[in-house]
Image (cartoon, rainbow, N blue to C red):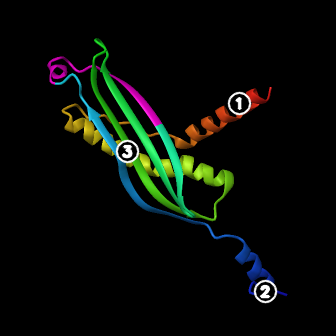
Amino acid sequence: MAEDNNTPQAGAAAAEKPQLKFSLQRIYVKDISFEAPNSPTVFKQSFKPKVNLDLNTTSSKIADDQYEVVVKVTAQVNDSETGTTSFLAEVEQAGLFRISGIEGAQLEQTLGAFCPNLLFPYARECVDNLVNRGGFPPLMLAPVNFEAMYAQRKQREAQQAAENTH
């Protein structure tokens, strides 16, 4: 005999399990900054850049099922020979996400890895545009593995928790 999925028990079980919902509501620049403290003298020498890149992500709950995720990219470029700062570009690329039906560690991973993966291409483009408008050659940032960054952060947190219990 075939099972009937429309039985009251099956319908009740489906109603108890929250439905997974994920949508990107908006992408926006939260903060942007560009400094070229040694221009125009920096343009007189050959450009031999040394790039220092800092990348960070944060998330915050805005409403019951709405979260803001921010990817902060800071690129400081110095002349490799003189150490003189060529430029400093900083971008906070943000997104507003509607997420429901995900909880605990899975929600944390979504906010810490999946959402930043969606936002990073926009941050890369913004940094590249800033640097180009500052009169410098484009700064093409390499793709970032936010899954690996998230895993490393969780590993560090676990090690710190283990050290604090001893």
Span colored in magenta: 40-55
Crowding at label 3, few (<14), some or many (≥20) Cα neighbours within 10 Å?
A: many
Q: Which residue is drawn at 74% across and 87% down?
A: 6
Lower sequence index among marks 2 and 3:
2
Residue reaching furthest front? 63
Can you identify the residue that label 1 sits on?
159
Left or right of 5: which side holds 19?
A: left
For the residues marked 2 and 1, what is the alpha-carbon distance in whole angstroms? 48 Å
Q: Which amino acid does label 1 sit on?
A: Gln
For the residues marked 2 and 3, what is the alpha-carbon distance in whole angstroms? 49 Å
Snapshot quadrant of residue 75: top left
Q: Which amino acid does label 2 sit on?
A: Pro
| The disc label shown at residue 123, or none | 3
Q: Nearer the viewer, mark 2 or mark 1?
A: 1
Crowding at label 1, few (<14), some or many (≥20) Cα neighbours within 10 Å?
A: few
| The disc label shown at residue 16, or none | none
State yes or no: discs 2 and 1 in contact (Cβ < 8 Å): no
Q: What residue type is labelled 3?
A: Ala
User: Would residue 47 be counted in the magenta stretch?
Assistant: yes
Lower sequence index among marks 2 and 1:
2
Image vertical order of residue 102 relative to residue 153, above or below: below
Residue 5 visible here: yes
Residue reaching furthest right? 1
Q: Where is residue 94 in the image (x, y as percent from the top left)?
A: 42, 50
Q: Which residue is drawn at 81% across and 86% down?
A: 2
State yes or no: discs 3 and 1 in contact (Cβ < 8 Å): no
Q: Residue at x 61, y 50 (%)?
A: 108
Q: Which residue is drawn at 55% across and 51% down?
A: 111
Lower sequence index among marks 3 and 1:
3
User: Would residue 7 be counted in the magenta stretch?
Assistant: no
Can you identify the residue that label 2 sits on?
8
Image vertical order of residue 10 relative to residue 60, above or below: below
